[in-house]
Image (cartoon, rainbow, N blue to C red):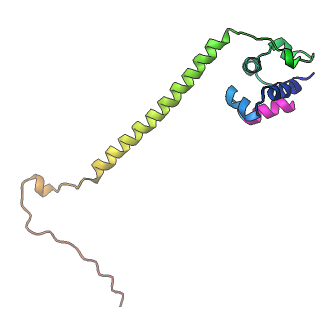
């Protein structure tokens, strides 16, 4: 049985959509679709992730023989702690990005607020009193 057919059968057995698989593997839904259509093949890292996701051996997934879907063995891999570590790192990266965006917004608000303060005139700094403030009027009579 071809790899693409196995991937479709295993996904359906788990009751997942292509979007679910893509989210769990952190790849695009189109990539999963191409794997299942036979247009491309998953990388070694993605094959290992698929084996963990569907709980099958890599040899069984890549062999030409059909996988007995009902009797998949429980597989413990050394990569599980590594996968959990990657997930924790992703969460911290997301939190870091959110914190950086919030900090940037705060800094922008501070600069905007400081810019909104009225400018102090040179006469005021020197202690001079200005008796009259002339304002120019604009007349737009077009007659």
Does the segment drawn in magenta span residue 65?
no
Q: Nearer the viewer, residue 106 or 126?
A: 106
- Image quadrant where residue 51 sits: top right
What are the residue bounds of the magenta stretch?
Answer: 29-38
* Quadrant in the picture for the N terminus: top right
Residue 39, can we see it? Answer: no
Q: Main secondary structure of the magenta part?
A: helix
Closer-to-camera residue (128/53): 53
- Report the quarter where the C terminus lies: bottom left
Residue 91 location (% of width, % of height): 54, 26
Write the residue at 82% across / 14% down: 72
Residue 93, image x and y in percent? 52, 27
Farthest bottom residue in view: 143
| 94 relative to 6 in the view: left or right | left
Q: Position of residue 79 (x, y in %)?
A: 67, 12
Look at 72% across and 35% down and name the residue there.
19
């Amino acid at each position: 049985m071809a790899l693409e057919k196995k991937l479709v059968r295993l996904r359906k057995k788990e009751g997942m959509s292509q979007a679910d698989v893509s989210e769990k593997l952190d790849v695009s839904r189109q990539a999963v679709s191409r794997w299942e259509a036979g247009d491309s093949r998953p990388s070694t890292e993605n094959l290992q992730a698929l084996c963990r996701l569907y709980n099958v051996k890599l040899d069984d997934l890549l062999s030409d023989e059909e996988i007995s879907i009902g009797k998949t063995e429980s597989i413990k891999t050394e990569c599980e702690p590594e996968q959990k570590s990657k997930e924790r790192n992703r969460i911290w990266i997301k939190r870091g990005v959110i914190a950086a965006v919030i900090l940037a917004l705060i800094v922008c608000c501070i600069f905007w607020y400081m810019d909104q303060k009225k400018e102090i005139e040179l006469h005021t700094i020197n202690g001079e009193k200005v008796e009259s403030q002339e304002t120019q009027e604009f007349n737009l009579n077009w007659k």
